């Protein structure tokens, strides 16, 4: 493990909670950014009460808030706001995911902070952005998936279905981390900070693959197709003797290989099947031929034959299988951290692999306000008397 972390020296003040914002700042903290997480005095981040919970400890919170320090602040009191603004002067980056305009009403918005920290990078992550007709609408992942178009494309033809994990939160957090790094690169060149505005609805809409262009180019409304692909065939989940397996052949070369493996070389000479546009029109016949072959074999048999032929395939893996998967282990995608209450727990790792400065998991998620006194003392040079006064007044 390198002793130098890629983002060492980057100071982030984190006003985020729940998923999208904490995921963003977690990615940056894993790579060495110093993240001070601001939480409400009484209950902290809502996810401290999110399942799974064991002995009062939320695994959900602990996963998303590793490598951070926690300070509790009452942002409704003058003293609490004063501390927050002093920390804003310290920060290189501020990340917040309140509803649009909320942090400005607290006197801690970009225009407020810029007066005392002109070079700050101010990252505002929200459901619908800082401007536009929907900016004041409330959002959680299910709302963003539906409004961004993802829900309309997911599920069976007769019923739309939200993607089960909070995907819009995660991808918005990733885009915000990317936006912060772009702003940091620009600041390095020019000395100027800026506002970074990333919205969940925008992000979902941007990752709908070819669906938007199906409408704008062909004036055709994309359809829900379950596990199938709108743009290539075969590309679906097929039934094996002992479960389900995914086979993906998004081009003619791969289909040629598959047709040979399943003993249907005749399809390669038939104009109804030998090109992808033709196969889209003949989806049922093509999938039927594959299903007739897969149903006679086990998942392991199918995967072995298709791997040998260099055809993309996999059994549908459960979470239980993945936590014991050797590739997940080899890629360090399951890391272990010690919690003082529940002991050792495994969490997903960081997918960004850097040769010289890899992610580091050096600090467990903080208890609520665990570092309040430490931050006030070491970062802002508060005396113990001043810290005690803030605590007695309920400001921290």
Image (cartoon, rainbow, N blue to C red):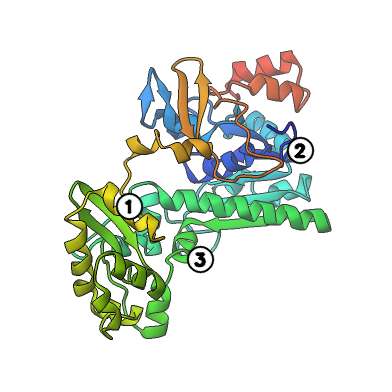
Marks 1 and 2, the one that precedes in the sequence = 2
User: Which residue corresponds to the image point at 27% horizontal and 50% vertical from the top-left?
Assistant: 301
Where's residue 284, x and y in %? 19, 72
Depicted 319 relative to depicted 177: above or below: above
The residue beneath circle 1 is 303
Q: Is residue 366 left or right of residue 195?
A: left
Where's residue 167, x and y in %? 42, 51
State whether residue 101 appears in this view: no
The residue beneath circle 2 is 9
The residue beneath circle 3 is 132
C-beta proximity under 8 Å, tags 1 and 3: no
Disc number lying in front (1 or 2): 1
Q: Which of 95 and 42 is in front in this view?
A: 95
Marks 1 and 3, the one that precedes in the sequence = 3
Q: Using the numbered discs, state the Cα–Cα distance from disc 1 to disc 2 in whole angstroms.
A: 47 Å
What quarter of the picture does the C terminus occupy? top right
Q: Nearer the viewer, residue 252 or 193?
A: 252
Crowding near the residue tagged with mark 1, few <14, some 14–19, many ≥20 C-alpha atoms within 10 Å: many
Where's residue 365, x and y in %? 54, 27
User: Which residue corresponds to the image point at 31% horizontal and 71% vertical from the top-left?
Assistant: 233
What quarter of the picture does the N terminus occupy? top right
Q: Nearer the viewer, residue 131 or 253?
A: 253
Q: What element carries label 1?
A: helix
Q: Is residue 303 left or right of residue 89?
A: left
């Amino acid at each position: 493990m390198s002793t130098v972390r890629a983002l060492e020296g980057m100071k982030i003040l984190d006003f985020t909670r729940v998923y999208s914002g904490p995921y963003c700042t977690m990615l940056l903290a894993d790579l060495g950014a110093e993240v001070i997480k601001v939480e409400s005095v009484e209950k902290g981040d809502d996810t401290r009460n999110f399942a799974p919970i064991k002995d009062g400890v939320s695994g959900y919170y602990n996963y998303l808030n590793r490598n951070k320090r926690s300070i509790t602040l009452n942002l409704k009191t003058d003293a609490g706001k004063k501390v927050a603004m002093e920390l804003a002067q310290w920060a290189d980056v501020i990340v917040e995911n309140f509803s649009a305009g909320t942090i400005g009403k607290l006197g801690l918005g970009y225009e407020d902070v810029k007066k005392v920290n002109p070079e700050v990078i101010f990252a505002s992550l929200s459901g619908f952005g800082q401007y536009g007709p929907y900016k004041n609408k409330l959002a959680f992942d299910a709302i963003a998936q539906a409004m961004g178009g993802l829900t309309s494309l997911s599920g069976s033809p007769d019923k739309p279905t939200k993607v089960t994990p909070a995907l819009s939160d995660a991808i918005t957090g990733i885009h915000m981390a990317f936006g912060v790094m772009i702003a940091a690169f620009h600041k390095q060149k020019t000395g100027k900070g800026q506002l970074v505005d990333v919205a969940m609805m925008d992000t979902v809409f941007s990752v709908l693959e070819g669906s938007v262009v199906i409408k704008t180019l062909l004036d055709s409304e994309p359809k829900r197709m379950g596990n199938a692909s709108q743009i290539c065939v075969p590309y679906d989940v097929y039934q094996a003797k002992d479960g389900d397996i995914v086979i993906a052949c998004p081009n003619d070369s791969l289909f040629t290989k598959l047709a040979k493996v399943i003993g249907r070389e005749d399809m390669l000479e038939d104009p109804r099947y030998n090109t992808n546009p033709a196969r889209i029109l003949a989806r049922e016949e093509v999938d039927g031929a594959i299903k007739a072959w897969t149903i006679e074999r086990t998942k392991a048999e199918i995967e072995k034959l298709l791997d040998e032929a260099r055809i993309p395939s996999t059994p549908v893996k459960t979470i239980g299988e993945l936590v014991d998967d050797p590739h997940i282990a080899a890629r360090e995608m399951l890391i272990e951290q010690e919690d003082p209450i529940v002991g050792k727990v495994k969490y997903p790792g960081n997918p960004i692999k850097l040769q010289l400065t890899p992610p580091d998991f050096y600090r467990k998620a903080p208890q609520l306000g665990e570092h309040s006194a430490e931050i006030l003392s070491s970062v802002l040079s508060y005396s113990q008397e001043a810290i005690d006064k803030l605590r007695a007044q309920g400001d921290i």
